């Protein structure tokens, strides 16, 4: 009989690449219950979904919740009242308990108190997957720093030591958790897609196609990539493949593209997470100029970066340390001197078609090492140790 694993994530499951990857690989060895918003991306043997309804509170309750957040600066009990006043947290707790798990994989800090409470009632082990550095995920926002930052710091300090193991997406982030909160060894499981053997497509020297995919989030300042295209020579075009994000932001990007890079920037529909690498394989370069407005953006090592490499694309980025280290190690792209569009434009303009072809070939080779099979083996080994 297979052991029972509950994967808990208060995210939209069918759009969450990291969680879908956990489900895909863990279902080979465990009976899986998924607890979260939305739905599964597809049916799988040994996987069931217990959906949680996302609850939007009326204004009076939202005001009370904000008051509890502020009150948490005085008494930590106010944070607990904030957390357990949310109906979806209670729904998720009951769903996890009903699954009778042997192990709970809690994704992101917001899910951790639920996992710890459920483990207390079921005897399950808890793996806390922090993803990024929770206390600074939106630290560029003053409102977030005032209201939410102390809450997330409390959740980590109060609940992370009670988990049986902890992982995150990047080594600098793992070490910061250890130092800041006095936590034991924090492991790293990176966001890397499954290996696909994809073909090499040589560059057309007069038509070099760039792609960026992800969510249209205003804090990511995607307009900087449009500004980059406006500064490079006519060989380069850019396609965006964006999920909805900040309301009204995608139309802003479309208007800017029409104004400063007409006919050179296009917008195409988003793709399912497991299809992205194959779909973008006929592009030449993946671009991500991510201005580091907070710690998580500074240390970003996102899905899309590895999907560029898996697709056999050259990579064009700013000097984000974690991404830049891998670009330089494997020779798969260019790194701008700073995060200004003009700097990345200079790097792109200096490239010959043969340079890009060589980078694309090195990406295809790097993908044989940088893939989910390698990363998910670490996760499955951790599951086995926790359940031993």
Image: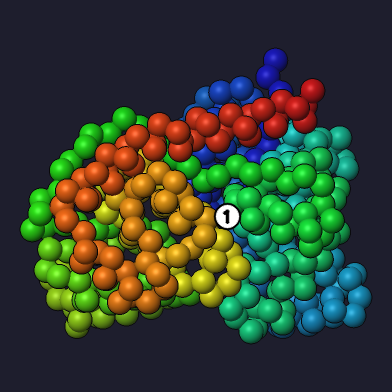
Image quarter of the C terminus: top right
The image's colouring method is rainbow
| Between 344 and 258, the one nearer to me in the picture | 344
Instruction: Tell me if residue 188 comes above or below residue 194 in the rendering.
Output: below
Residue pointed to by mark 1: 11
Q: Residue at x 41, y 66 (%)?
A: 318
Q: Give the farthest residue toward the left.
A: 206
Residue 115 in sight: yes
- Where residue 4 appears, as percent x and y from the top left, is 70, 28
Q: Position of residue 333 (x, y in %)?
A: 33, 53
**Label 1 crowd bin: few (<14), some (14–19), many (20+), radius 10 Å:** some
Tag count in the figure?
1
User: Could you tell me residue 367's position as x and y percent?
Assistant: 39, 36
- The residue closer to the viewer here, 276 or 342, is 342
Residue 266 visible in this rendered orientation of the protein:
no
Q: Is residue 59 above or below residue 134?
A: below
Q: Is residue 242 left or right of residue 372?
A: left
Q: Which residue is depicted at the point 65% across and 40% down?
A: 7
Q: Residue at x 90, y 70 (%)?
A: 77
Residue 341, compared with residue 298, is above or below; it is: below
Q: Residue at x 71, y 74 (%)?
A: 148
Residue 190: percent from left, percent from top: 55, 44
Image side of residue 127 versus residue 255, left or right = right
| SS state under label 1 | strand
- The image quadrant that residue 227 belongs to is bottom left
């Amino acid at each position: 009989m297979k052991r029972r694993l509950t994967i808990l994530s208060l995210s939209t499951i069918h759009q969450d690449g990291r969680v879908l990857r956990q489900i895909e690989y863990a279902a080979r060895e465990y009976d899986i219950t998924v607890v979260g918003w939305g739905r599964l991306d597809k049916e799988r043997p040994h996987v069931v979904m217990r959906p949680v309804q996302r609850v939007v509170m009326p204004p009076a309750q939202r005001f009370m919740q904000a008051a509890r957040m502020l009150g948490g600066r005085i008494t930590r009990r106010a944070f607990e009242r904030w957390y357990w006043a949310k109906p979806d947290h209670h729904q998720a707790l009951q769903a996890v308990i009903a699954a009778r798990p042997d192990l709970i994989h809690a994704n992101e800090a917001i899910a951790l108190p639920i996992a710890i409470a459920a483990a207390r009632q079921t005897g399950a082990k808890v793996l806390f997957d922090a993803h990024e550095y929770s206390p600074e995920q939106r630290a560029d926002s003053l409102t977030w720093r005032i209201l939410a930052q102390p809450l997330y710091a409390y959740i980590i300090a109060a609940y992370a030591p009670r988990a049986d193991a902890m992982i995150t997406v990047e080594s600098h982030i793992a070490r910061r958790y250890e130092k800041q909160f006095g936590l034991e060894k924090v492991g790293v499981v990176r966001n890397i897609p499954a290996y696909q053997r994809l073909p090499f497509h040589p560059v057309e020297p007069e038509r070099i196609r760039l792609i960026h995919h992800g969510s249209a989030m205003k804090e990511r300042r995607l307009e900087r990539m449009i500004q980059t295209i406006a500064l490079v020579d006519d060989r380069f075009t850019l396609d965006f493949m964006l999920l909805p994000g900040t309301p009204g932001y995608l139309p802003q990007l479309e208007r800017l593209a029409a104004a400063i890079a007409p006919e050179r920037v296009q917008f195409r529909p988003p793709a399912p997470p497991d299809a992205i690498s194959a779909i973008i394989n006929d592009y030449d370069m993946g671009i991500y100029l991510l201005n580091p407005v907070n710690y998580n953006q500074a240390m970003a090592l996102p899905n899309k970066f590895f999907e560029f490499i898996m697709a056999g694309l050259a990579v064009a980025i700013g000097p984000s340390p974690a991404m830049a280290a891998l670009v330089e190690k494997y020779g798969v792209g260019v790194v701008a001197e700073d995060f200004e569009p003009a700097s990345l434009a200079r790097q792109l303009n200096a490239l010959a078609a043969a340079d890009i072809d060589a980078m694309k070939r090195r990406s295809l080779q790097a993908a044989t090492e940088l893939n989910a099979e390698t990363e998910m083996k670490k996760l499955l080994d951790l599951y086995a140790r926790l359940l031993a």
